[in-house]
Image (cartoon, grey):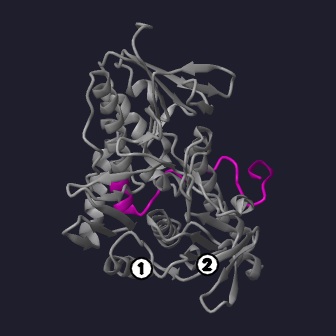
Amino acid sequence: MNAELPHVVIVGCGFGGLEATKVLEGAPVRVTLIDRSNHHLFQPLLYQVATAGLSAPSIASPIRHMRRHQRNLTVLMAEVSAIDKTQRQVHLDDGQTLTYDHLIVAAGATHSYFGNDQWQTYAPGLKTLADAFKLRARLLSAFEKAETLADQPAARDGWLTFVVIGGGPTGVEMAGTLAEIARHTLKDEFRRIDPSRAKVLLVEGSDRVLAAFKPAQSAQAQAQLERLGVTVLVNSRVVGIDETGVELQRPDGQRERIASHTKVWAAGVAASPLARTLDVPLDRAGRVIVDEHMNIPGHPEVYVVGDMAAAHSVEKDGSRKPVPGVSPGAKQAGRHAARQILARMNGRSEPAFRYRDYGALATIGRKAAVADLGSIQFSGFSAWLFWLFVHVYFLIGFRNRLRVFADWAWAYFTFQRHARIVVEPQHQGDPDEA
């Protein structure tokens, strides 16, 4: 690779980083892609791994294999510890330093516990495959633990109560799937407990679930959840989480404690801590405030895209609308940043970034989903089919698409989930999770 060519460093191989890499294929640049893992993860289906519906290889692909034909690309599996925008350097945690001409930062987001980081031990979130494996072990181990406590009803009920915190798409999908597992997947498999008597609670601090959707669709989603057996608690703020339960505060100020050993956090995200090393203005979620080309102030060679960026779409009338933190937004921003790099190398500039909104989807469970395609909204079985085919289509690789489609078809007709192997049971308070 010609060392005299401009060097583009991309941090993170999520949706934004991957799309930027594709745009730069064949361009007269050297590209270095850095990621802490060796795979690209299709995060919208991560909850399916956590709930034993899919195996990890179905939604993850090795980066080197995916981009093996891109001759101007070098892939490094490493952790970025800091970025020095003045010296144009990226520092790795092993002491290495990379110098760049152009930088695209797409390091994603992490969980936000709103200042209560101690809750993470008891209510894990879901961002990585490692998170999914641990959460799957917790969920399945809870039923196993309850089976050993059949003669202790009070203790058993705490293991058969699942609390999902956060009524966004991830929380809704997780709650609906847990209800299906309890009522269908595990049917006839236990002798001392009845899994269908498990309680699944979805806790949301605002007045409705799926707040990003229209109110009518939120109501439809809640009705579908309740038909699946999920108890939806809106206007309920979490004020405490410990090993054995969750404490909620109602609008009237009254507090209620729910005994539960298994909690899932889906209530908030914060930008990667890497954002703070850029020493630029951040919003309340820790995201980098970028301009119409995804650049940070004063540094047109540095781009921030995806969940790390507080970006706006410049509409035809000149107005600015926030770019939602969803995969299409990250993909479009990544492509824009890469095209802007190539344009500036040729002495010109791309038009201001404009987000193209293709709509929003959320699945709730078997034959239950909501879809908002702008002028068209629908729910139920048709929305579920649409959600299924959209997600299969956007998976990377024919093999993954075929595998996921086959797994879902099998689950639809049999209610079974094949990825239910637990290597090491996990419970709240285990030493390796503290």
Residue 24 seen: yes
Taking the spot 27% from the left edge, 56% from the top edge, the residue there is 357
Which residue has dot 1 on it? Answer: 222
Taking the spot 25% from the left edge, 52% from the top edge, the residue there is 356
Q: Nearer the viewer, residue 165 or 310?
A: 310
Can you tell which quarter of the image residue 430 is in? bottom right
Q: Nearer the viewer, residue 72 or 121?
A: 72
* 35 falls in the magenta region: no
Q: Residues within 10 Å of mark 2 (few under 14, many from 20)?
A: many
Q: What element does badge 1 sit on?
A: helix
In the image, taking residue 28 as reference, residue 241 lies left or right, namely right
Q: What element does badge 2 sit on?
A: strand
In the image, taking residue 38 as reference, residue 357 lies left or right, namely left
Q: Position of residue 380 (x, y in %)?
A: 29, 73
Tell me: residue 403, above or below residue 391: above
Q: Earlier in the sequence, mark 1 or mark 2?
A: 1
Q: Which residues, given as a range, are shown in magenta?
A: 408-434
- The disc label shown at residue 237, or none: 2
Q: Nearer the viewer, residue 191 or 219?
A: 219
Question: Which secondary structure class fits the magenta region best?
Answer: loop
Can you tell which quarter of the image residue 215 is in? bottom left
In this rendering, the count of numbered labels is 2
- Comparing labels 1 and 2, the label whose residue is closer to the camera: 2
Taking the spot 27% from the left edge, 67% from the top edge, the residue there is 372
Can you tell which quarter of the image residue 341 is in? top left
Tell me: residue 372, above or below residue 42: below
Q: Tell me how far mark 1 sits from mark 2, CA to CA.
A: 18 Å
Tell me the quarter of the image containing the N terminus: top left
